[in-house]
Amino acid sequence: MQTKLIRIDSEHIDIVKMREAATLIREGELVAFPTETVYGLGADALRPEASAKIYEAKGRPSDNPLIVHICRFEELERIAKIVPEQARKLAEAFWPGPLTMVVWKNEKVPYTTTGGMDTVAVRMPNHPVALSLIAESGCLIAAPSANTSGKPSPTEAGHVADDMDGRIPMILDGGAVGIGIESTIVDLTEEKPMILRPGYITKQMLEEVLGEEVIIDPGILATDTTDPSQAGQKPKAPGMRYKHYAPKADLVLVEGDTDKVVVEINNLVEDAQIDGKRVGVIATDETMNRYKADVVFSIGARDDEDAIAQHLYKILREFDEQDVDAIYSESFKTPRIGQAIMNRLLKAAGYQVLYV
């Protein structure tokens, strides 16, 4: 299969190009497209055979649900068995935006799309190309990240091409994304709203809108602090149980006081180099000149957590291009979206953490 890469100006969308992509969606084919979080791999969410193509192209486990992308709130009402009042409040506050809501599905949504579950995850992306594709196609679009399953999510069209060239008919290139980590997922089918995946929309933000407590899936908290194979509780969201975001090289996080972390990482780098390994380090603007590794990338200034989130997956992919054998990274427990950033880094590292 030949993959067509089409450049789309997000500010001046070429409707002819968009209609070509929308036709593919209507025909049950796959189109990769930008959202404000990461690039998505889209297909008609209500056609089982179309959703099945997503799993095949990604090599994705079939029990890992797909998020359904919509462009109008009425489309949530079309596929939900019940639309809770909480969903209306959250949509008014955060849609379009990086928030996914889980509700009970109705019979219109095939189990292929929901990974065999009776719930469906839905969001309205805040990106003109994504919204235009949904509207022009007339379809609800199921779309996980447009990468090979397990690899870092794509934040540029080139990343999608690296993984999907020859597997899908079209990639819409809308430039680099804005946020860089996937949406927050909140489950509205529980007694209390529950965060199943941390993201840009935080627990505090959700609670302010809903006026009630929002809890975090205990399975996430367990896996974010220890080896998930030894944790007493698995995450509720199937997708959070799988290894994600991983570069080819072995990644280890080092936590602690900054000066001690720099010393420890340099010691680890030296030991690895003695063993003949090519070594990379993920640093910040403040520390990158203090490391002696073969490749050092800054993820941004430590107090700019938006930049850290935006650069994370790109840097992990750049290490693949540099052909390193081992990567050591500082940790980034920033005040607002630090949990989301560390959640992704921990999963990329396979929960390998050294404390100094």
Image (cartoon, rainbow, N blue to C red):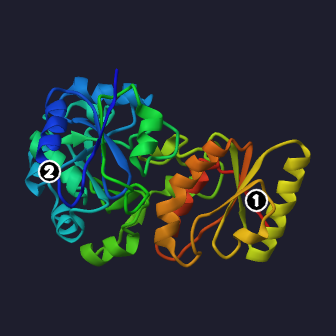
Q: CA distance from mark 1 to mark 2?
A: 44 Å
Q: Position of residue 271 (x, y in %)?
A: 89, 52
The structure residue drawn at horizontal position 77% and vertical position 53%, both measured from the top left corner, is 294
Which residue type does callout 2 highlight?
Answer: Leu
Q: Earlier in the sequence, mark 1 or mark 2?
A: 2
The disc placed on residue 354 is 1
Pointers 1 and 2 in contact (C-beta within 8 Å): no
Q: Position of residue 140 (x, y in %)?
A: 16, 42
- For the residue carrying disc 1, how many other residues have a C-alpha within 10 Å: few (<14), some (14-19), or many (20+)? some
- Report the front residue among 158 and 37: 158
Q: Up-down: is 150 above or below 212?
A: above
The disc placed on residue 76 is 2
Decide if residue 74 is on the left or right side of residue 105: left
Task: Evaluate whether residue 342 shows in this view.
Answer: yes
Circle 2 SS class: helix
Quarter holding residue 286: bottom right
Q: Position of residue 297 (x, y in %)?
A: 65, 60
Q: Position of residue 346 (x, y in %)?
A: 60, 54
- For the residue carrying disc 2, how many other residues have a C-alpha within 10 Å: few (<14), some (14-19), or many (20+)? many
Quadrant (top left/top right/bottom left/bottom right) for the N terminus: top left
Task: Evaluate whether residue 340 shows in this view.
Answer: no
